Amino acid sequence: MATMSGSILTLADRAYLLRMMRRHTPSPVHRRMNALLLLDDGWAVERVADALFIDAETVREHRRLYETAGVAGLERLNYEGSDPALSEAQLGALKTELDAHLYMAAKEVCDFVQRTFEVDYTPNAITELLKRLGFVYKKPKCVPAKADALVQEQFAKQTLLPLMAQASADKPLYFVDGMHPSYTAHPGFGWIRRGVTRELKSNHGRVNVNINGALSWPDREVVHLEAEKITSEAMIALFETLAARHRTATAINVVLDNASYNRSTAVKEYLASEGCRIQLVFLPPYSPNLNLIERLWWLLKKTALWNEYYPTFAGFKAAIDGFFRNLGSYRKQLTSLITDHFRFIGAPKSQPP
């Protein structure tokens, strides 16, 4: 039988909450009632938070809600707290601040609001406000700092898109780049039960699988060769493989980055040799977004590497080999993922109203 301290709830309210807990109630309301009953039983805030898989500040907020609005407040799902609301101008200033600076914790946003507008919010309340303003909690995407969006756009319009439009059996087009997955854990996002830490075993990461790949457009066919290291010789071997696939083509256009081995003396001599039909098209500096094969590598990592633990290197390599062996089963994903639509790194982003 539960102990009744009576330090928080009145007897009538406690009886009502116990009665409602036995009925079907919306989950947020049920959780608030549960928290208040446990607090009334004498549980510490932190213990209640652990038991209900919520943070301690949320438990305190439920108590404040009961103290200011009673049982009716607990049952009101659209309750927004008793703190003063921000004006439209203040909300606009808050959105501008959040667009300019990344805050890692809701408490930091609370501090900014209090410091700037002298309005107090709890972390839970500010989180709900940010959601209503259209913000979500996620990581920023790392991009090359020296990328030039204008140069990328001009290259795409003047060179890349025309090459893609003209690609044919006589002049096939390939996007080329290497991939070097290391033998270790590759964590990705996933659904994990609240309050639970999922561990992903990792390895030493000192061994890599070096893959030199080529992706054709518009067929989206894949050619890949493994090498101990991507060098000039490895690039020439890949070019020879492409030439053998297109014996009647008059030219084979290859889009690739500015890695030193792509511009080496050995590669230049190969390109200048009699009968060579490989024509290199170099991407602008710092623009991996324009190389379609990067999207293939993303699919490989998502399919074979992310959130997976391989006890042996042989198993790790077998997973990668299996991806290429079963490429036909990913045809639908490849078609939707690998298109002629490009995003330009560093381009100004339009902000929602």
Image: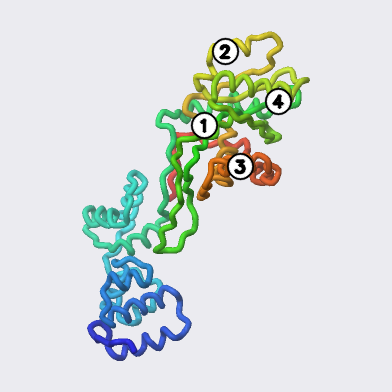
Residue 266 image label:
2
Q: Disc 2 vs disc 4: Cβ atoms closer than 8 Å? A: no
Residue 139 image label:
none
Mark 4 or 3: in front is: 3
Q: Disc 1 vs disc 3: Cβ atoms closer than 8 Å? A: no
User: Circle 3 sits on which residue?
Assistant: 318
Q: Residue at x 58, y 31 (%)?
A: 211
Q: Which SS class for mark 4?
A: loop
Q: Residue at x 39, y 76 (%)?
A: 76
Q: Residue at x 26, y 78 (%)?
A: 67
Disc 2: CA contacts within 10 A as few (<14), some (14-19) or many (>=20): some
Mark 2 or 1: in front is: 2
- Name the amino acid type tagged 3: Ala
Q: CA distance from mark 2 to mark 3?
A: 33 Å
Q: Which tag, 2 or 1, sits closer to the chain's start?
A: 2
Mark 2 or 3: in front is: 3
Q: Which SS class for mark 2?
A: helix
Q: CA distance from mark 2 to mark 1?
A: 24 Å
Query: Where is residue 96 shown, x and y percent of the image?
Result: 34, 47
User: Circle 1 sits on which residue?
Assistant: 288
Query: Where is residue 32 shown, x and y percent of the image?
Result: 36, 76
Q: Disc 4 vs disc 3: Cβ atoms closer than 8 Å? A: no
Q: Which tag, 2 or 4, sits closer to the chain's start?
A: 4
User: Circle 4 sits on which residue?
Assistant: 172
Taking depth in this image into account, of 76 and 34 the one nearest to the observer is 34
Taking depth in this image into account, of 312 and 254 the one nearest to the observer is 312
Q: CA distance from mark 4 to mark 3?
A: 30 Å
Q: Which SS class for mark 1?
A: helix
Query: Where is residue 98 shown, x and y percent of the image?
Result: 34, 49
- Name the amino acid type tagged 2: Ala
Disc 4: CA contacts within 10 A as few (<14), some (14-19) or many (>=20): many
- Name the amino acid type tagged 1: Pro
